[in-house]
Amino acid sequence: MTADPQAVKQRRVRDGVGFFRTFLKSPGSVGAVLPSSRWLARVLVGRLDELEPGDLVVEYGPGTGPMTAAIRAALPDGVRYLGIELDTGFHELLERRFPTLDFHHGSAADVTAILSDRGLPMPKRILSGLPFASLPAAVQSNVVSGIVDSLRESGGEFRTFQYVHAYGLASARRFRALMRERFASFERIGPIVRNVPPAFVLRYRDAR
């Protein structure tokens, strides 16, 4: 069944209002005024058809779910998904909006413990909507360590994005420098100019 365009538009407006309210309450935890666009979501998710049944995709900071929807549309049969969301309101929204997917209410820095507790394998793909440029240095380091620990074992890859206007910020540069130390392969895609604001997608492979 084709989605009603008016209903989709109304939902995006509601998502934008809710996202903006969360931004006002805690800009460091959200890092953007609006949810990511479907254009950015499609580039960030990329192709998942090389994954095999039993593989796991983990999403950090799904928010209102624009990237989650793109993941769900591209997820091959038998490939599992787990979204990790720290904000209580967003977590509740995600569980209502995507009842067939699994979500964890907690911090992405605890990814290895979360996966162990749930009996899940290390992920083949981690896709992140976290605002790394807005995170304190210690939090950045803890999240990156979790990414490396999980992907080193699985041989998977990590994708995130940074807004063009924030790309040169010290915290954004620090994050990329930290990732260069921990990954052998890096690719920058974009900018995705149809997103507001425009953003680069960052792709990392070969954790070390």
Image: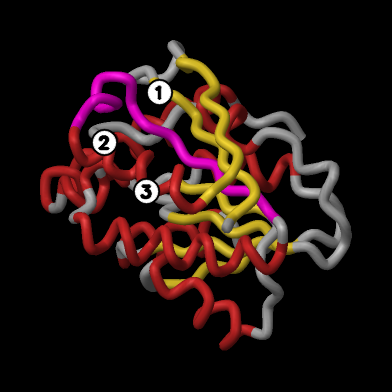
Q: Residue 36 versus residue 110: which sits nearer the camera?
A: 110
Q: Which residue is mark 2?
A: 32
Specify the quadrant of the image occupied by residue 55.
Answer: bottom right
The answer to the question of whether label 2 and label 1 lie on touching residues, with beta carbons closer than 8 A, is no
- Residue 35 in the image, given as x and y percentages of width and height: 37, 35
Task: Say which amino acid is labelled 3.
Answer: Leu
Task: Say which amino acid is labelled 1.
Answer: Ala
Upstream in the sequence, badge 2 or badge 1?
Answer: 2
Q: Can you say which quadrant of the picture contains the C terminus? A: bottom right
- Badge 3: how crowded within 10 Å, few (<14), some, or many (20+)? some
Q: Residue 122 versus residue 42: which sits nearer the camera?
A: 122
Point 41% across, 62% down: residue: 85
Specify the quadrant of the image occupied by residue 167.
Answer: top left
Dot 3 lies on which element?
helix
Dot 1 lies on which element?
strand
Q: Residue 2 versus residue 23: which sits nearer the camera?
A: 23
Specify the quadrant of the image occupied by residue 20.
Answer: top left
